[in-house]
Amino acid sequence: MTASVDNAQPSTASTDTLGTVIDDVIRPQAAIVDRERTFPRRGLDALAAAGLLGLASSTEVGGGGQSMRAVATVIERLAAECGSTAMVVLMHYAATAVIEAHGPREVRAAIATGGHLTTLAFSEYGSRSHFWSPTGTATVTDDGTIRLDARKSWVTSAGEANSYVWSSLPLSQGVGPMTLWLVPADSAGLSVTGDFDGLGLRGNGSRPMTADGLRVPSAAMMAADGAGLDTALGAVLPWFLVLNAAFCLGLADSAVAEAGRHVTGTTLAHTGAALRDAPVTRRDLARLMIRTAALRAFLDDTLTALESGRDDATLRVLQVKALAGETVADVTDGAMRLCGGSAFRKELGLERRFRDSRAARVMAPTTDALHDFVGRVATGLPLLDEANR
Ligand SMILES: Cc1cc2nc3c(=O)[nH]c(=O)nc-3n(C[C@H](O)[C@H](O)[C@H](O)COP(=O)(O)OP(=O)(O)OC[C@H]3O[C@@H](n4cnc5c(N)ncnc54)[C@H](O)[C@@H]3O)c2cc1C
């Protein structure tokens, strides 16, 4: 895994524009997206029109050229309002990272200008969360095109994205465990093969997809045959893990803020006391605030480690999603308890954040896998070998 990113500063114009998009479209739509399981197309169109879907793209192709830190801020702010939208945009930025490095210029330019939504299609029914061991195949056909066959178990924005960054076994034996492809959404043989009715992130369209004799030109290969795992670890994973941590931070921070408002403004008629007047309530709120602030500081340190090329940058990147996934699960659980039955209903938006937050720890690499990776780095073992493939 490489551990460096450029250090461009956040664009004030972009973040202010984001505030307008959030106020006008994303916040008003969030509960509807969750309740109706609606893909957040309106929010995405607004983000695209504001230039925010091209934020991570190079200025050379018309994108924002922004740093990982600036992009993480966007994900954090979106997650505070609508987890589904935030996850769609997160997967778009993660896939953009590999397309920027290895994709064709016209697709990079389309992403940069907001006209192209992309995502990652890694997880498979066969190897489940072990995305580093694809079971789907790629074969050269008689006419020189490539045939892809696979059963992908989860693809965010399935049937909605314009392209899929797609993993497969390599074409040739002995070159490496994985090859990456850029699969256009309109490819014959590509289909969405199920519904998404999840606990949380209910609008993000994480549906299964099947490639059945799908054909792409050989030029659809990204990086060399067999080099897909190195690309996934080097170009995609840092973005995915850091942005996932920012996603968790946005959810946790907004849950704590909501809990704080509730315990401050809710009173018991028979005593005149507010919920905050109970010391145990203040203590519990403080614990949630401290957990969230610690996550913010850790994420900030991770970004600093990446920006400065610090020796522990790789370790920090692996740690940050594990910490974030568990922190947000605990913090949203604690916020639910603090706010009682009011949180159990939909009126505070807390139960939605609680449900949305459960995704981070099971998205691959899962918390379990990351703990193993961190232990491997700490003891001088490779991230992956025969024992954990
Ligand atoms: C909302 C959402 C969106 C998603 N979007 C995408 C997407 O866009 N693209 C994509 O490719 N995937 C996506 N995924 C899939 C995700 O990355 C995982 O692959 C998926 O959640 C794994 O589920 P599973 O049931 O197959 O887990 P399993 O692999 O069956 O794992 C079950 C449990 O066992 C644990 N476990 C597994 N192996 C080990 C081990 N060796 N040691 C210790 N514990 C282990 C896991 O940590 C997990 O807790 C998404 C998932 C969710 C929830």
Image (spheres, helix red, strand yellow):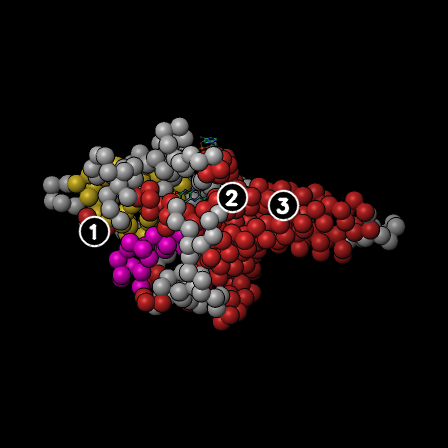
Q: Which of marks 1 and 3 is nearer the N terminus?
A: 1
Residue 136 in view of the camera: yes
| Figure quadrant, ligand 1 | top left
Give the x, y percent position of residue 233.
38, 45
Examine the image and state in which quarter residue 154 appears.
top left
C-alpha separation, residue under disc 1 versus residue under disc 2 = 36 Å
Which tag is nearer the camera, tag 1 or tag 2?
2
Q: What stretch is highlighted in magenta?
A: 88-109
Q: Can you identify the residue that label 1 sits on?
A: 219
Q: Mark 2 points at which residue?
A: 319
| Magenta-colored segment: predominant secondary structure | helix
Q: Is mark 3 on a helix, strand or loop?
A: helix
Query: Which badge, 1 or 2, comes first in the chain's sequence?
Result: 1
Label 1 residue near ligand 1, CB within 8 Å: no
Q: Which residue is drawn at 47% across and 57% down?
A: 308
How far apart are labels 3 and 2 at the CA level?
20 Å
- Quarter of the image containing the C terminus? top left
User: Residue at the spot x=72%, y=49% of the render?
Assistant: 286
Q: Residue at label 3?
A: 332
Does the stretch in magenta take in 59? no
